[in-house]
């Protein structure tokens, strides 16, 4: 098992032709669903929900079948994605801090922790490289009174929800537009006329049109299919003999799939398809309940949102970039949210700090071999009553609940469901993972380990 190497500095003078890239920087669109399960997409084996546009994206691009979120819940996953720091070092490690933070403005009683405001993000890095930057959806890592709202963290334009407790209200009476509240009077007094994610779709299409000369980075963390279960119409699922919640959930996923279709169509209409890299993924695994069990959202993997087993962490990823990324491809290289920032930095020729936790997978995206990548150590942690830790290296996955807890060990190649703990037969591996778990956890005053 290799030690974590500091991230190499990506020089501003990086030559795009090194990987056969065109001399113009590509546009980048990163679409992220909220609580979408690995098994909810047809291209990842799902059989219940119609997702023709994601499936088409997969036929024209590559599926990454061992891609992971940075955390099994919302706020820390977004923190890891934006900062490139894993959850053992990141500032935000759960949705609510155990100590400190601020009382949220939306809702009652919950406390939230925001980024400090001076951390580099994917957006600020790409902005320095000449990209126009926009985001619409759920931010979740900076409260309204913080210094870490999207337009303070590298984004030129922003529309959406700052707080995750606000985000499930699809018929909300306001969203944030840059630094101001944008009222939605059509949804006041119990009216339900404007579906918030439709506005995010509109933002995305307008942003693409406004920045067609490029390059642009568009981050779209839609709030579908996170509960509450609300959608304007259940559409094609109306006549299904399914539980009502399952119909609504499926309709929400299909609605998101429709947004993707509209975005891809607009890229084609504007002649931007060949110079645009499109990603589609989810922020964490599906919620564990009767609805998602009925739909097999976790694709028979163990666990769900809020756990560090595969069902909570492994998420679908599709990437399309015509003539650059293999059409119809499938890649089982393990990688995760910490790798997004260095990958996009190398792609854009931008510089990054040297102490991030990820590495660039640009060669892998482009079909080049990266030796040793599969064996590196990937780390997750999730503080609950006790600290939950997980790590992967090669085919091996380890899980520990509590810093003094026993380490479980699973062979994902032979046992993808994590059903058989083989720790008693692999003492040396267990000891190696224990060293890694102890080294990668940096204590946080907001989530003290007792």
Image (cartoon, rainbow, N blue to C red):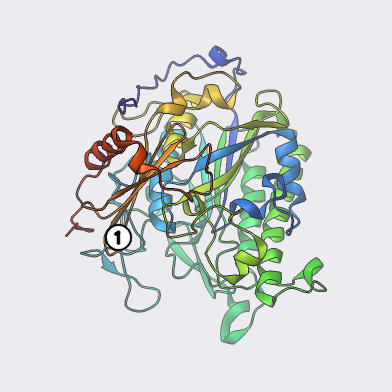
Drawn side of residue 298 relative to residue 90, left or right:
right
Q: Which residue is mark 1?
A: 113
Residue 181 in the figure: left or right of residue 402: right
- Residue at x 43% of width, y 51% of height: 78
**Please, what secondary structure does the residue beneath circle 1 have?**
loop
Report the residue at 71% width, 40% height from top. 57
Query: Whole-percent x and y of residue 318?
Result: 63, 40
- Point 58% across, 56% down: residue: 298
Visible residue check, residue 335? yes
Disc 1 residue crowd, few under 14, some 14–19, many 20+, Cα 10 Å: many
Against 192, residue 282 (above or below) is: above
Count of marks, rendered view = 1
Q: Quadrant of residue 198?
A: bottom right
- Picture coordinates of residue 303 (x, y %)? 48, 57
397 vs 276, left or right, is left
Query: Where residue 11 sits in the image (x, y, percent)?
Result: 39, 19
Instruction: Answer yes or no: is residue 129 visible.
Output: no
Quadrant that contains the N terminus: top left
For residue 250, above or below residue 433: below
Q: Position of residue 381 (x, y in %)?
A: 33, 50
Quick one: 392 or 79, which is closer to the camera?
392
Residue, far front: 425
């Amino acid at each position: 098992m290799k030690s974590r190497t500091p991230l190499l500095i990506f020089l501003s003078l990086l030559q795009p032709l090194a990987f056969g890239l065109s001399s113009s920087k590509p546009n980048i669109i990163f679409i992220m669903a909220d609580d979408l399960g690995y098994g909810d997409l047809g291209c990842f084996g799902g059989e219940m929900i119609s997702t023709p546009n994601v499936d088409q994206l997969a036929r024209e691009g590559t599926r990454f079948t061992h891609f992971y979120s940075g955390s099994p819940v919302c706020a820390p996953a977004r923190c890891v994605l934006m900062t490139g720091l894993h959850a053992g070092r990141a500032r935000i490690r759960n949705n609510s801090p155990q100590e400190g933070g601020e009382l949220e403005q939306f809702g009652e009683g919950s406390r939230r922790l925001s980024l400090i405001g001076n951390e580099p993000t994917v957006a600020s890095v790409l902005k320095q490289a000449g990209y126009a930057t926009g985001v619409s959806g759920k931010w979740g890592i900076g409260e309204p009174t913080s210094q870490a709202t999207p337009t303070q963290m590298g984004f030129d334009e922003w529309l959406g929800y700052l707080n995750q407790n606000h985000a499930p209200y699809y018929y909300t009476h306001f969203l944030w537009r840059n630094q101001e509240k944008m009222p939605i009077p059509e949804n006041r007094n119990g009216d339900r006329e404007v579906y918030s994610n439709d506005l995010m779709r509109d933002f995305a299409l307008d942003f693409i049109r406004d920045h067609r000369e490029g390059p642009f980075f568009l981050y779209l963390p839609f709030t579908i299919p996170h509960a509450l279960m609300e959608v304007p119409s259940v559409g094609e699922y109306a006549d299904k003999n399914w539980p009502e919640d399952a119909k609504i959930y499926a309709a929400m996923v299909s609605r998101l799939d429709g947004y993707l279709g509209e975005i891809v169509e607009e890229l084609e209409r504007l002649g931007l398809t060949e110079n645009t890299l499109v990603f589609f993924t989810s922020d964490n695994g599906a919620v564990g309940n009767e609805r998602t069990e009925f739909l097999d959202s976790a694709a028979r993997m163990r666990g769900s949102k809020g756990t560090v087993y595969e069902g909570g962490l492994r998420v679908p990823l599709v990437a399309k970039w015509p003539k650059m990324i293999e059409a119809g491809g499938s890649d089982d290289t393990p990688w995760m949210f910490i790798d997004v920032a260095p990958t996009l930095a190398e792609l854009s020729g931008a510089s990054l700090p040297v102490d991030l936790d990820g590495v660039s997978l640009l060669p892998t995206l482009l079909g080049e071999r990266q030796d040793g990548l599969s064996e590196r150590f990937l780390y997750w942690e999730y503080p609950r009553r006790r600290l939950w830790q997980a790590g992967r290296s090669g085919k091996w996955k380890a899980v520990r609940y509590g810093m003094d807890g026993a380490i479980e060990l699973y062979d994902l190649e032979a046992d993808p469901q994590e059903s058989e703990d083989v720790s008693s037969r692999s003492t040396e591996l267990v000891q190696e993972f224990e060293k890694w778990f102890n080294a990668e956890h940096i204590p946080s005053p907001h989530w003290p380990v007792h």
